[in-house]
Image (cartoon, rainbow, N blue to C red):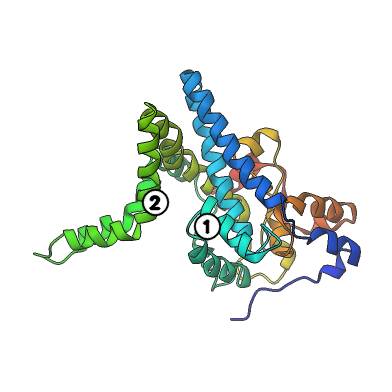
Amino acid sequence: MPAAARVQADTFFSPGEWQALTARSSWKGIALVAHCWLVTGAAMAVGVIWPLSIPLMVVIIGNRQLGLFILMHDAAHGLLHVNRAVNDRLALWFCGHELNIYRPYHLQHHRFVQQSEDPDLVLSAPFPITPGSLRRKIIRDLSGQTFVKQRFGGLLKKLKTRASGEAAWPLIAAELRQQRIFLISNGVGLVLFSAAGLWWAWVLMWLLPMATWLPLVSRLRNIAEHALIEQNGTDPLRHARTTHANLLERLFIAPYWVNYHCEHHMFTQIPCWNLPRAHRLLAARGFTADMEVQAGYATVLRLASAR
């Protein structure tokens, strides 16, 4: 099937505007990565000093963990730094070691967005769902079931379906090798925090957010971006959704302008920090009336669970 339809930038922006919108930066991406880690560190410090604040810190840190993924996403497009080598190293070292695996997968998503060959279509195709189904998904996310399935589901499936008499250890060893960076990095973190007498802080304010709030906000992000979008549609202004996000939504659900997803799909060369400006220009010229834009995440969830 042919790739998804594309837009021409000069239909929407002047040459000067386009040059400014697509300009890479030698410091903004670094600053955003530093910001993400500083917010995480500050939240953990607050939780250590005032343990009663830990539930709130779990939400804030889980959203920053999503933020690291969002910044790795920008790096997959080569947008995080003006130098491609620095762009990739910044993502690999500080945002997620999965960059080299994620990049070809994600670029295929962009090439065939909402078409039959889109590898992410499975995430949006089931919607709308019933309110009960949405509640069950949220419960699985917040209880850690989604995390276990995503991180260790391959191992569990192999162990359940292995041939009779086959030793389990080779399967376990293979899965551990696949998960080695995740296990080593978190093991090192646990050791370092334990040396400071704060092992519980690592468990409660890094692993717990990763196992609970991160899967939930990742699901909300996927729903907001592509759920209820026409499959095999031909209008490039309606291949993804932009969701307006207020201050609380940006703090708890949508970091680093991830909510401007329609603009991102229309213009993949624009770094995340310029997406709000692109949206304002498009709105001023009346183009957003033809785009898929919703007022907030609550609105999107109501639409997605309206079956």
How many marks the image carries: the answer is 2
- Of residues 218 and 182, the one drawn nearer to the viewer in this rendering: 182
What residue is at 56 percent from the left and 59 percent from the top? 89
What residue is at 59 percent from the left and 46 percent from the top? 67
- Of residues 181 and 192, the one drawn nearer to the viewer in this rendering: 192
What residue is at 56 percent from the left and 48 percent from the top? 68
Residue bearing mark 2: 182
Q: Is residue 153 visible?
A: yes
Q: Name the amino acid type tagged 1.
A: Leu
Q: Residues within 10 Å of mark 2 (few under 14, many from 20)?
A: some
Q: CA distance from mark 2 to mark 1?
A: 13 Å
Q: Residues within 10 Å of mark 1 (few under 14, many from 20)?
A: some
Q: Of helix, strand and loop, which one carries label 1?
A: helix
Compared with residue 33, is residue 227 higher up or lower down, i.e. above or below?
below
Residue bearing mark 1: 92
Compared with residue 300, is residue 285 higher up or lower down, i.e. above or below?
below
Q: Of helix, strand and loop, which one carries label 2?
A: helix
Q: Name the amino acid type tagged 2.
A: Phe
Q: Which mark is residue 263?
A: none
Query: At which x and y percent is residue 72?
Result: 58, 55
Query: At which x and y percent is residue 225?
Result: 62, 54
